[in-house]
Image (cartoon, rainbow, N blue to C red):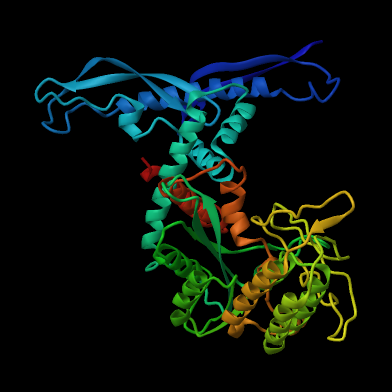
Amino acid sequence: MTQRYRIIFQTYDDNAPNAILTQEALLEDSLNPPTSCLDFSMGLEKQLALIQKAQDCVVDKKVKLLQEGKNNCPKCQKKLHKFGTRQSIFHDVFTDHKLTIQRLKCKGCGYDAPATVKTIINTTQSGDLKKIQATLGATHTYREGEKIFELFSMRSRRINNHDRIKHVTESIGAVIEKIGETEKDVTVADAAMELVLNVDGGHINTVEPGKRSMEAMASVVYRPEAICSNGKDTRNYLSSKSCAASVNDDNQQIISGTIIAALKQGLTDKTHVTALCDGAANCWNVVEAVRPLCGDMTCILDWFHVAMKIENISLPKKLKQKLMRIKWHLWRGNVDNALTRLEQLIESSKDQKHSTRTAIPAGDSCAVFPDGSNAIADPPRECDDGPLGEESPTEGKTASNSTKKLDVDPSGSVVSASAGIAGTRIKKFSKYISKNRDKIVNYKEREKSGLVFTSQLAESTVESLINRRCKGQQHMRWSREGLSPLLQLRAAINSKDDWESKWKMAIINAA
């Protein structure tokens, strides 16, 4: 005996479930024993066909319900008359529908009742489709989003082309931005005793005349207990966080967004905030805007950025070794000793004659990883100032999206910097340390005490909010008008539960 199955669409009265009003077969097929993974299930093509037929039935019934009860003109109360039909289009996640909608017109005042999907619900797309388009547009390039839709729909659809995904992403992002402007006065959350604030920035290639790049800023606020471990040798993740981002020239948008993010995490006038920054003045300005709203604040120069700057200074071997000893002092918060030795190092660079080529010192990281997450730790070495590289996996880490690899010849040597260039680089680093000396802490003791001292304990703010989407390909160039709504959308998506609470309102109000 050959078995077959039939999937049926039925409508019935809710008060009498057994009384079938209409019935239609959607799919019929035979049941055969599977021979491989290719025929174990119904198959994607049949699943999509089933969804299409079921959706056709549901949408058709709903369109007919639109006409029920519309007998009189809402303007003059005279009887409405049938006035032909109109063809209309509706798009869902996997399906497209051509609908025939009855026109109703008033012969008295000329009122013409809405008779297209666009005039009835203000769009031709389902909310779920717009949500997926916006999410893909925020997390992938628009063309990648188009390809992903083609993969799951098994066909190319105009509604999912890259231009449409771009339009939906920008319009929903713009609404998210407007929603954010009103959140400060209505945000309520359980009070937090401790919060961590990380503010950072990144440069994005721009189409603006006379400029090569523009700075985008991002911040993330979370409770220390939200840091969760993924396992050995893997980066931690945050179970709860609130994010903000901005590409505006002034700091007002990122300041407002950061305050709202902190309030969502439970900021009160009794909360202690630990603020981590890379040392840039505009980042500290954002942090200082939060200070009046909290109980107390500890500002820390992010150890990740300190270590990154040290590792990425290209110097001859002997000078590099001395610089690594200075790193040992900074790790312990000995700023005065570090600055003194930096001055001595600058003098040494003036006296030392360098060969044109210098071998790469063991343990020095000359190659920089592109994703901003990998790093090379220095192996333990003994020196008169104390052991190097003994402290923490994070102590010697470095990563940079903007630093280029050094030119290495086949023998494993690199072109050395001249004395003047070496001195300039060391001076620049010394100025950086001096400018942020009051933000440098004893990182070793904070690590021992289980306290936050670096942004790399969890996912990178700039990497997750900005670089992954906006700098994934070198040819990407952005305008502020196009990038701003995208960053707002990415900030909402990266904030736990924030996107889920906003997407319906954003979609309904988007253009």
Q: Which quarter of the rendering shows the N terminus?
A: top right
Residue 387 appears left or right of 70: right
Q: Position of residue 160 (x, y in %)?
A: 51, 29
Whether residue 20 is visible here, answered yes or no, is no
Residue 137 vs 148, above or below: the answer is below
Q: Residue at x 76, y 82 (%)?
A: 444
Q: Position of residue 394 (x, y in %)?
A: 76, 70
Residue 237 vs 109, above or below: the answer is below
- On the image, which quarter does residue 508 sit in? top left
Q: Residue at x 54, y 36 (%)?
A: 142
Q: Residue at x 84, y 77 (%)?
A: 388
Q: Position of residue 287 (x, y in %)?
A: 50, 74
Q: How many marks?
A: 0
Please name whichever residue, 45 or 490, is drawn nearer the observer in this view of the structure. 490
Q: Position of residue 351 (x, y in %)?
A: 75, 77
* Residue at the limit of the structure toward the top, as seen here: 1
Please name whichever residue, 424 or 90, is drawn nearer the observer in this view of the structure. 424
- On the image, which quarter does residue 94 sit in? top right
Residue 248 appears left or right of 454: left
Whether residue 64 is visible here, answered yes or no, is yes
Residue 436 appears left or right of 388: left
Q: Which quarter of the rendering shows the C terminus?
A: top left
Residue 145 vs 490, above or below: the answer is above
- On the image, which quarter does residue 202 sit in? bottom right
Residue 100 vs 343, above or below: the answer is above
